[in-house]
Image (cartoon, rainbow, N blue to C red):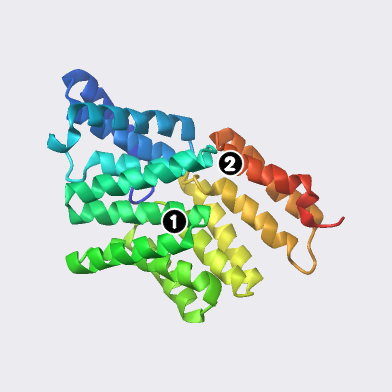
């Protein structure tokens, strides 16, 4: 629950309690469950080295003991959770090939389990990775598959997520106002449901669609809301990317202010460096070297 509402302080405290229990019981299922939760939480917080440590513990132990045969404290398979966010960690750390392989592993594992929610979850995270790295065709296909599963099983929250991602994949090139409306309303519906985890990601999608449709002012306002959310809730995986895209949008404005562009790029670099996000840091450094693309 704490993860869903983006109360990552409470979520981390609970996850460490789970880890203590795992230490006391020595049970593999307890250790896997605790590390899966910690890996997810640290990914959301943008603490990538810590996230990777716990995720890879899950992958190693689950594989070693055939975790699919274990009974876990919660209904969701923890390997699906770990593999879901693993590609995001790998990509941000500059390992794009490994991230793509991890997407494949996540989907293979979820399909093998034969459980509808686990598969919809894996498809949604794979689509998230693909949108971040620009693989929109695959993201669209994955999101459509996820939506079909959600509609068949009346999983309303993940159906909203799938519709949001579908709207983005199509709307980023078609610029259809109705798709921006679907994404905007879907993101707001998730907020009303209390589903705030990764809200900054969905606001980023909305901002990108607004920008591509020519509404730069709305796009910048949406990105500012995403940044505010990330800082308020410590939901920081997207934070460097948000600063980076904010700088690029500012640079394209008719009355661009070079100092504002540079400041945003510097924040992108410093945030990424703090997170251990090599790829995000390098992208921002390259742009910063061009003085934000704005003549002073």
- Assess disc 2: are there few (<14), some (14-19) or many (≥20) residues with their C-alpha within 10 Å of its C-alpha: some
Quadrant location of the C terminus?
bottom right
The residue at the point 30 percent across, 28 percent down is 60
Locate residue 40 relative to residue 30 in the image: left or right. Answer: right
Locate residue 140 relative to residue 113 in the image: left or right. Answer: right
Q: Quadrant of residue 191?
A: bottom left
**Dot placed on the residue nearer the N-terminal end, 1 or 2:** 1
Residue 216 in sight here: yes
The percent coordinates of residue 258 (x first, y second) are 80, 55
The percent coordinates of residue 227 (x first, y second) are 56, 53
The residue at the point 85 percent across, 57 percent down is 295
Farthest residue toward the right? 296
The residue at the point 53 percent across, 37 percent down is 93
Residue pointed to by mark 1: 199
Q: Is residue 226 above or below residue 8?
A: below
Q: Quadrant of residue 52?
A: top left
Residue depth check, mark 1 versus mark 2: number of the one nearer the observer: 2
The residue nearer to you, when weighing 57 against 190, is 57
The kind of secondary structure element at disc 2 is: helix
Q: Quadrant of residue 101?
A: top left
The label on residue 279 is 2
Q: Is residue 34 above or below residue 291?
A: above
Locate residue 70 relative to residue 183 in the image: left or right. Answer: left
The percent coordinates of residue 5 (x first, y second) are 35, 51
The residue at the point 42 percent across, 74 percent down is 182
């Amino acid at each position: 629950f704490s993860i869903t509402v983006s109360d990552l302080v409470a979520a981390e405290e609970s996850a460490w309690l789970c880890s203590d229990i795992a230490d006391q019981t020595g049970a593999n299922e307890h250790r896997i469950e605790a590390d899966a939760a910690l890996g997810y939480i640290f990914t959301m917080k943008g603490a990538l080295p810590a996230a990777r440590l716990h995720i890879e513990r899950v992958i190693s132990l689950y594989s070693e003991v055939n975790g699919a045969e274990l009974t876990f404290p919660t209904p969701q398979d923890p390997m699906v959770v770990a593999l879901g966010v693993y590609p995001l960690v790998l990509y941000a750390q500059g390992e794009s090939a490994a991230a793509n392989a991890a997407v494949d592993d996540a989907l293979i594992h979820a399909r093998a389990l034969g459980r509808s929610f686990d598969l919809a979850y894996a498809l949604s995270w794979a689509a998230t990775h693909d949108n971040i790295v620009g693989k929109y065709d695959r993201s669209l296909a994955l999101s459509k598959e996820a939506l079909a599963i959600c509609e068949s099983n009346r999983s309303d929250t993940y159906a909203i997520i799938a519709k949001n991602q579908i709207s983005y994949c199509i709307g980023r090139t078609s610029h259809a106002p109705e798709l921006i409306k679907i994404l905007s309303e879907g993101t707001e519906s998730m907020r009303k449901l209390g589903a705030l985890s990764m809200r900054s990601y969905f606001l980023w999608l909305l901002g990108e669609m607004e920008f591509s449709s020519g509404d730069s002012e709305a796009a910048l306002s949406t990105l500012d809301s995403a940044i505010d959310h990330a800082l308020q809730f410590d939901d920081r995986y997207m934070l460097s990317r948000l600063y980076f895209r904010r700088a690029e949008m500012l640079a394209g404005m008719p009355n661009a202010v070079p100092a504002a562009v540079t400041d945003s790029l510097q924040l992108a670099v410093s945030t990424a460096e703090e997170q251990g996000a090599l790829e995000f840091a390098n992208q921002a450094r390259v742009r910063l070297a061009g003085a934000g693309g704005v003549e002073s």
